[in-house]
Amino acid sequence: MLSPQLPSDIATPAYVLDAAALKRNLATVARIRREAGCKVLLATKAWAMPAAFPMMRDALDGTTASGEFEARLGAEEFGKEVHVYAPAYGPGEVERLLPLADHIYFNSPEQIERFGRMARAAGKKIGVRINPGYSNATLGGALYDPCAPCSRFGTTLADIDRLPWGAIDILHTHTLCESLADGSVGLIEHVAKTLAPYVRRVKAVNFGGGHFVNKPGYDVDRLIAAIKAFRAEFGVEVILEPGAGILVDAGYLVASVIGLHHNEKDIAILDTSASCHMPDVLEVPYTPLIVGAGMSGERPHTYVLGGKTCMTGDVIGEYSFDMPLEVGNRVVFTDMMQYTLVKNNTFNGTRRPDLGILHEDGRYEVLMTFGYEDFRRTLG
């Protein structure tokens, strides 16, 4: 059941970063930075593993955060530029961000009126998020569409002239989710067409995340050409903030079959959980791929794979295998870095998976294991 490149003795469950795959993805990012002349940041909301940051620094300009703790992580562990955006900042949060972040983005006229002068006085670059009314979010419908009706994110075009443009350095617009080049280029061209007077008043434009630059089929040349054309037209710096786009197919969730059951269909119970360890399987929803398996009915033996929690809906999906499953078999889910370890939880007292790295020489290193004390600490 195991992928050939993974050691057979990995304790499960475990998130395993594939260092070689990550470096291949980073080469794409480095090419975009070099040829398009733009900045690229890691969106730590999608993935953050500080042990891997040293192999990422040369390919990236820094990190982008969604709040104080992520900003601190970027400042202390990554060590380059830190950009931070939140739809609203709580009491004292901006003050605590000032020593951490180089660039602070605000969501609305109200937020920039309350906190902009403070950030400016501290020498920070000031950004504002705009909702441009364009979306190419290809995953999850309105749940993952930053420009869905009544979205919390960004100043709308109706309110754009309420912003103090003389005090704004960066126009920020994030409208994509797992988009190929059609979405990325479409956003760049839309901003050039609809927001040109405002772009000419700032020093940089941040096109946010959702650029799935390492997904098969993404036309990197087309993205590079669009960025170069935008920079030539407006004379501004361009920033991208991919998260998942840097981690595509760069790691696994390795699990084991711990029980077999039958209720109309054959069911295999794993020591992992959709609810706890891969919540987007339920939220999006989507069905991740498994090494050496097919979808239901494609191979001789089909099983429903479920998690070990008591939640009825903790079901990962239906898969088929060449041989019947047995207790102890390993199951390797692919593309399991983004939005997994950053969103996992301990519902039912379920243990968080180990964090590990598969090094380029084939050596497997366990970075962290979790136990009762981690569960207990979250309960106060």
Image (cartoon, rainbow, N blue to C red):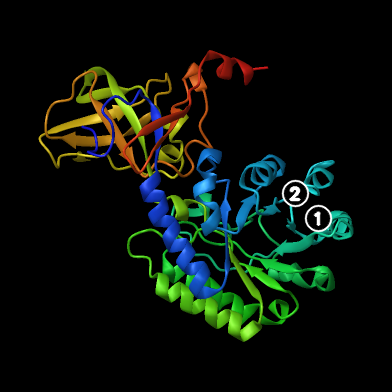
Q: Secondary structure at mark 1?
A: helix
Apparent side of residue 182 relative to residue 327 in the rendered image (left or right): right
Q: How far across and down, in percent of the image, does residue 18 sit?
A: 37, 43
Q: Amino acid at mark 2?
A: Ala
Q: Secondary structure at mark 2?
A: loop
Front residue of 264 and 167: 167
The residue pinned by badge 2 equals 88
Apparent side of residue 136 relative to residue 8 in the rendered image (left or right): right
Q: Which mark is residue 111?
A: 1
Name above or below for residue 99 compared with residue 314: below
Instruction: Give the image quarter of residue 45.
Output: top right
Real-space CA distance between mark 2 and mark 1, rounded to the nearest whole angstrom? 7 Å
Residue appearing at x 21%, y 32% in the figure = 1
Residue appearing at x 23%, y 20% in the figure = 263
- Res. 261 in view: yes
- Res. 275 in view: no
Apparent side of residue 111 relative to residue 141 in the rendered image (left or right): right
Q: Which mark is residue 60?
A: none
Q: Amino acid at mark 1?
A: Gln
Q: How far across and down, in percent of the image, does residue 220 sit?
A: 41, 70
Q: How far across and down, in percent of the image, does residue 68 sit?
A: 72, 42
